[in-house]
Image (cartoon, rainbow, N blue to C red):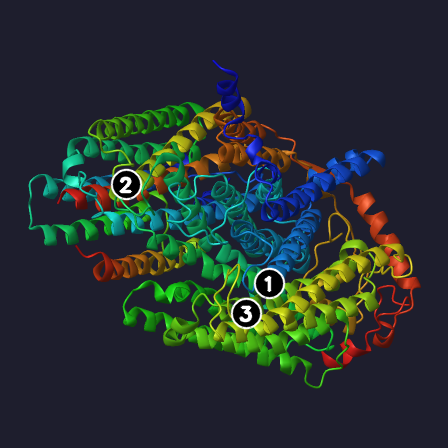
Amino acid sequence: MKRNDAQYHYDLRIYQWGLGLALLLTAIPFALVAFHGAPPSVLLWMIGVLGLIQVIVHFRFFLHIDLSSQKREDLHLILFTVLLLVIMAGGTIWIMHNLAERMMAS
Amino acid sequence: MSAGNVNTEALKHPGINLGEAHGEAHTQAEGVVFGFWVFLMSDFILFGLLFATYATMVDHTAGGPGPKALFDLKSISIETFALLLSSFTFGMASLNLKHGERRKPIILWLLATLMLGLIFLGLELHDFSSMIDKGAGPWRSGFLSAFFGLVPLHGLHVATASLWLIVMLVQMGVFGLTPRVKTRLLRLGLFWHFLDIIWVGIFSIVYLAGLS
Amino acid sequence: MTASDLWHLVFGRLGLQSLPFWDMIQHPTPSHIINGIIATGAAAVVVIGALVTVFLITKYRKWGVLWSDWLTSVDHKKIGIMYIVLAFVMLARALIEALLIRTQQADGLNGGFLSADHFAQLFSTHGTIMIFFMAMPFLIGLINFVMPQQIGARDVSFPMMNSISLGLTAAGAALVMVSLVLGKFETGGWTAYPPYTEAAFNPGPGVDYWIWAIALSSIGTTMTGINFAVTIYKKRAPGMTLFRMPLFTWTALCTAILMIFAMPPLTAVSLMLALDRYLDFHFFTNGMGGNMMNFANLFWLFGHPEVYILILPAFGVYSEVFSTFSGKRLYGYTSLVYATMAIAVLSFTVWLHHFFTMGQSANINAVFGLLTMIIGIPTGVKIYDWLLTMYQGRVRFTVPLIYALAFSVLFVLGGLSGVLLANPSIDFQVHNSLFLVAHFHNMLIPGLLFGMLAGYHFWFPKAFGFRLDERWGRLSAYLWISGFILAFFPLYALGLMGMTRRTVSYFDPAYTPWMLVAEVGALVLTAALTTLVIQLIVSIRERKANAVPVGDPWDGRSLEWAIAAPSPEWNFPVIPTVTDRDPFAVAKAQHTAYQSPPAYEDITLPTNSAMGMIICVVGGLLGFALVWHMWWLAILSALAVPVAVIAKSFDTRTEKVIPAAEVRQQHQAWLAQARQETPISRQLETSPDNHGLADNTIAEAST
């Protein structure tokens, strides 16, 4: 056991940091919404940005994805998926929004 | 086992330590884990499309209730807290799996994870039923269809993960911590943390954006 | 509880009216009788076909062999072969439907002999089957069979999952077949656009058949994609870097990636339509905030990458065929790889060109129109590479090369009509016309089908140890090619004349002559399939004369040709080490092929598993129960899936060991045979002298 102690504590700290950051990044937007801490348009942007940061935090601290060469394959996979998601989800929202404006406007 | 060796293995698979005797097991585990990552990404696309559909339908309330009338911030924040904490407790289980391999702490942390998962599910079901009580079931409007297409799908994933967790608890009892059981636990861990990421999307895009 | 209540509890909405001859008996008008006879005949073919199969298997006592050597096998080669058998069965059905469609339209001036509903079922099943249950199984089967052997692997990464994928695809296909006997199939085309397919307008079982067939096969295909991609990433032989992989494997990788990311939209959209129909959701309904335009959007998010899932493996086959039968290295390998990758990524950016006319702004149309035109560039690069592969080669006009040559001319023509359609202002003119039908058949028949048939002829000797008959093969190829031209070029003209697709009858006599030519084409295509069947029978009968046991009938270039034919269960007695592209051609040129390895080792292989069959049966029952609202059966079979998976996860006997001695004995016997044979020149390639050992003068001249 002793031999692994340093590694153990290092790994433990990673999870602790992950939990701390995740809680913080969750608490801020929840509080902002609960107490109407910002005008709606600003609030939406903040929720979006904080959510994005939190996703990265989860990938880094819980799923252990980093820039090291061992993780390169997984990282490439994730980035490629994100690219496709941006194309697919972004495209869907763009097209449907445009159609709604042109055809379904009340 | 030298410390250096432990470190390289540790870097390969955080949360797993298959030991040196299983060189073959490691190569196989690598394929299995990579395959699971690919599955997760495929699932990610599925969720992404439902998010996009939700975003395009959020205004389609058809005269029915909208997000502000239906979402309960308090309940959502408890659910969120339970799920976040469960990611940490699963992390603790992985940590014990990697260092020490004593079964008892692993089982305890996994049980804690399961509990938190079940609390989350219970609260979520309660949310859904109170929405339906208000006449806001998926049949009420396009918006609610999109909501009930997306959020319960995540819940279904959490339920599947919980069932998987129970199976793994049994398998730890039956087989002990064999390489097969360890890789399965590793994959379950990836799944669990991944579902947390989806939940971040849900509470941001569905709940918080809906209430702001 | 009354008897009728009990019936509904057990059989749901299944009833006498679900039988194909019920309409005819209830309303014996001439039209009902004609349609009833055709529908009943089709149902009878399905039932009698199934009964005859069961009878023959029982008579020759083959159930045991079928079960233990095939259905429960997790060997990638056998799974591949089963996929292709499924593809041929479904091809036969969908081709006969095509013939009926053509006949109806040839006779369609002011009427025709089919009812509109029956005709709609025909074009819907024809499209659904050809895409999901002919093309997909064919290419998946081919990749399954070939790819692990090309990369020097013993199996795919997840052999049992492979068998489950096959089970799910087969269950989907079975649902489409059952729809011939019980109830009717969907009538909204293979794309099943709502709101027409919503419960409000289409309450019957037809759309549900479509939904569950699609959902099952899409999940199976996603799993296949994961399997292939991980296999190619993780199981390559030592030394086989990505840029030493054969081009077929490259296209398999890109197709697998497309499957992984393009199948989820299809799964999503079919299940969303199911939620609308079963649980009163409003994703795509007319009212209550539904948005049917999102169906088209999501469907084509799948649908366009799907086009490249279909075409890329065929590109891979053509690359192998052009290179092998020109006795040359593939020209522009690197550019072909980059072109394949570019096509794979771009295929995700053009989906909107399937609905230019839906009403979005001209700017959006322009963006997607431009992207669509750009995707033609890498495809053009490929065509030039293939032409230059043949340039200065010693080209042999074997059956696969005939298909490849026909492809290279016809596909360019189809591509040109595609570039026309990519222009939104032209698309507005010909949208939903027969011009479009001509275009995509022009891409898919010379592209996909000819490619698959070329691959079938090319790798058949590797799978079964004997060549297919060359003369019948050529006749069949010429029939496919001429039949295609006759059947589809008239549709370009008809489309420009204004004839819309999926039309049961028309009033303009100017259409008729073109329709008659297309009908002749359809008959020729039917003859083409018949000759293909005859070829198989003739080849099986003459299998001794055409045997190629040494395994290299075409002077092949990649690793799959370096082993016996049929391939041993473990493919490679010793995993090869790769030092270059075209490793087997290099080995032959350096006289290092057919050598005894220094030592043999025990080989670990996965054991048989019934999981694939269990999931097939349970999945099929689940789909059937949901179609007919047999809720008890639906719940039971839905529960059976996790139960089976969990039970299987407790099974630890998943591997078997082949002792080194057995591997040695078999390998040495094969090597001895190889030493005895005389290497034959390429002039004798298609003669019975070809026993699968090539003389390597050509390989020396050009590597």
**Residue named by callout 3:** C438
Same subunit: marks 1 and 2 = no
Cα–Cα span, label 1 and label 2: 38 Å
**Residue named by callout 1:** C313
* Numbered disc 3: secondary structure: helix
**Residue named by callout 2:** B147
- Answer with left or right where residue C664 lies relative to residue C185: right
* Numbered disc 1: secondary structure: helix
**Amino acid on which disc 1 is placed:** Pro
**Amino acid on which disc 2 is placed:** Phe
Question: Is residue C371 visible in the rendered structure shown here?
Answer: no
Mark 2 crowdedness (10 Å alpha carbons): few <14, some 14-19, many ≥20? many
Q: Is residue C682 above or below residue C199?
A: below
State which chain disc 1 sits on. Answer: C
Q: Is disc 3 in contact with disc 1, using a CB cutoff of under 8 Å?
A: no
Residue depicted at 71% across the width and 37% down the height = C656
State which chain disc 2 sits on. Answer: B
Cα–Cα span, label 3 and label 1: 22 Å
Q: Quadrant of residue C169?
A: top right
- Residue C109 place in picture, x, y as percent: 56, 65
